[in-house]
Image (spheres, rainbow, N blue to C red):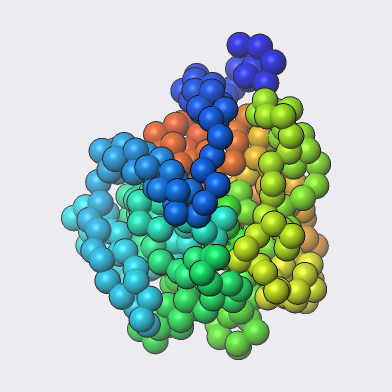
Amino acid sequence: MTGFHKFAPWVSAEAAALFAAEAAASAEPLPSDIASLRQHYDAFNRRHLAIARDHYPVDIVRDEIAGVAVDIVTPAGFEGDRRTLLCLHGGAFMWGRGAGALLEAVPVAATARVRVIAVEYALAPEHVFPAAVDDVFAVYRALCGTQAARSIGIYGCSAGGALTAQTVARIIAEGLSVPGAVAMLHGTGLEMGGDSRASTAFLTGTDAAPDAPSLATMPYLAGARAGDPLVFPGEHGDVLTQFPPSLLVTGTRDFAASSVSVMHRRLRAAGADADLLHFDGMWHAHHMATTLPESRETFVALARHFDDYLA
């Protein structure tokens, strides 16, 4: 492989092959309207979810908590404890419901052997900040009425990683007990700028840096204030010092890598317990391909993180 397709020998052959295939597929232009974008990504998520269901045996029940639709995912034959993870799916706050949320919940539930609740939060452009936070906060508060906050974890990828940080900031602002631990993958409580946004163009073979989520580009953040600690909590050390133990995950070909690594440094500087898992060669949301060795490593890291900190 040459150019941007060349990987170091420690990157799995499966990941290198998938990257080449997806790089070729990404040359096709994306739909421009929201309905078609949702259909496009739903088809992608359904393909990957079918593979995940074959490799990670789970049971799925559709339910509602605090008026918010959820999917409750448990390992097949689950007879575990009361620990619960809230899964906040990615999708630029505009898509990812259904198959996308399950794709992020299924392998974690099976690997960690805990109950995972995938939250169907409000999406933009129909709903704007803080609508998604309101939904997740309502589910979290309801769960806290039935189990200890320290037995609850929250994790999310991309927009879900940002939403995880926003939800923790909201929990702190409302005076509730923070969850036992959180994880933020390929997205966090900062704008997705920095060197990674520019360098990703070279590393992924695209013509220009991708539009990263920001106040200027995200419909969900229309009308939000950059200085609001509930929007970008990573800019506020007084909030970060109250964060629960956090695991952050990114890769060198992830346009969010700079923001994720800076968030890790800021959490540490604020005195919070924070770990960073930074994969060489991996791209944005690489673990959506759930059977890659690097994806399995991600799920094991999540399982260990929540196992270490959840009561």
Q: Taking the image as drawn, is residue 306 in sight?
A: no
* Picture layout, residue 76 above or below residue 296: below
Location of the C terminus (image quadrant): bottom left
Residue at the left extreme of this rendering: 77
What residue lies at 67% left-to-right and 21% top-to-bottom? Answer: 4
Return the x and y of residue 205 as percentages of the image width and height: 67, 25
Q: Please tell me which residue lies in front, 74 or 38.
A: 38
Return the x and y of residue 41 as percentages of the image width and height: 44, 45
What residue lies at 70% left-to-right and 74% top-to-bottom? Answer: 223
Residue at the top extreme of this rendering: 1
* Picture layout, residue 185 above or below residue 220: above
Q: Please tell me which residue lies in front, 146 or 225.
A: 225
Return the x and y of residue 142 as percentages of the image width and height: 40, 83
In-image side of 13 versus 186 (left or right): left
User: Quadrant of residue 296 in the image?
Assistant: top left
What residue lies at 37% left-to-right and 65% top-to-bottom? Answer: 117
In-image side of 220 versus 234 (left or right): left
Q: Taking the image as drawn, is residue 76 in sight?
A: yes
Return the x and y of residue 246 as percentages of the image width and height: 61, 60
In-image side of 283 versus 216 (left or right): left
What residue lies at 40% left-to-right and 48% top-to-bottom? Answer: 39
